[in-house]
Image (cartoon, coloured by chain):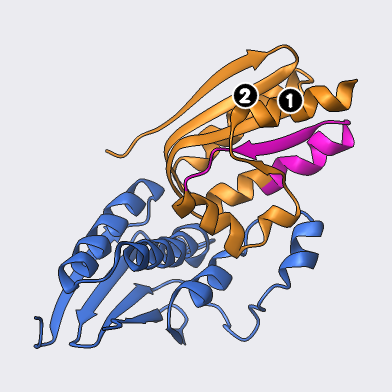
Amino acid sequence: MEKFEVYRKDVEDVRILNIQGFLDAHTAPNFENELQKLIKENSFKIIVNLDGLQYISSAGLGVFMGVIEDIRNNGGDLKICCAAPKVFKVFDLLGFPSLYEFYDSEEKAISNFSDKKK
Amino acid sequence: MMRKEKKFQLKLPIETANLEIVREFVARIAQNMGFSEENIHRIELAVDEASTNVIRHAYKGAASNAKFLTVEVTTHADRLEIDVIDAGKGFDPDQVKTPEMDVYLKKMKRGGLGLYLIKTLMDKVEYKIKPGKKNRVRMIKYIVT
């Protein structure tokens, strides 16, 4: 079975979800639950690290679209980092880079949150 | 070199857990035909999207127990032809508009991106809709040599 896993890491007030494996219509609800947990605990500074993500379909992209409004309305943001070219391409085909910030490293995404705090 | 037309068929219950099987099925055939890694990914994704649409929408409200998804793959010398077939309620392809992505994303609307992606990823897409009988989305990818 192809796997999908979500690991959470906290760096100060930034929450980082590291998602790994295959994100499709089958595994998307799992990812959505993890994001909803963050929203419920009022954590709105979120980074999704795609370093270990091997595959994404539009069902996975739909999860990002489903939560972003809620996050931004609460003064936060969801930033995306470390996507492999194959994965980034799918985001790109659907125009996501005009709506979400993409970074090539987790550190850059974190420092962007910290810069705004100052 | 593959010269003769060959057919492969996969019939599965409509469960999202089976998407992985569908992807591996088409990826293996595309690989054997000599498609590039990038095109194999495009084919896998297009077929995933078409299958996801069937799983999520085709049988909505249907009482029947016979809820299946069929993937038929035909290999030709110059192209790969993939049919995703269901016997559900069907849809009107003309009513499925190509979303203007800027507007679409700004509205934060989710879902409905599948058919747009399929059109972008494949060389040709054809629909044959007979609601309750046989609905077919045919996707074609040419081998560029």
Residue A37 on image: x %, y %? 66, 23
**Total number of numbered discs in the rendering:** 2
Residue appearing at x 81%, y 58% in the figure: B106
Residue appearing at x 46%, y 40% in the figure: A27
Q: Is residue B108 above or below residue B141?
A: above
In depth, the one of A86 and A15 nearer the eye is: A86
Q: Can residue B109 be seen at all in this image of the molecule?
A: no
Q: Which of marks 1 and 2 is in front?
A: 1
Residue appearing at x 47%, y 81% in the figure: B131
Find chain A in the image and tell me its colour.
Answer: orange
Of the numbered discs in the image, which one, if any, rests on residue A111? 1
Residue B115 on image: x %, y %? 54, 71
C-alpha separation, residue under disc 1 versus residue under disc 2: 13 Å
Residue B28 on image: x %, y %? 20, 61
**Which residue position holds label 2?**
A16
Give the magenta-colored segment's residue range.
Answer: A65-84
In depth, the one of B69 and B19 nearer the eye is: B19
In depth, the one of A106 and A90 nearer the eye is: A106
Q: How crowded is mark 2: few (under 14 residues within 10 Å), some or many (20 or more)?
A: many
Which residue type does callout 1 highlight?
A: Ser
Q: Can residue A114 be seen at all in this image of the molecule?
A: yes
Residue A63 drawn in magenta? no
Residue A48 on image: x %, y %? 61, 33
Where is the N terminus of chain A found, in terms of image quarters? top left
Closer to the chain start, of discs 1 and 2, is: 2
Q: Is residue A60 left or right of residue B8?
A: right
Q: What element carries label 1?
A: helix
Of the numbered discs in the image, which one, if any, rests on residue B50? none
Q: The blue chain is which one?
A: B
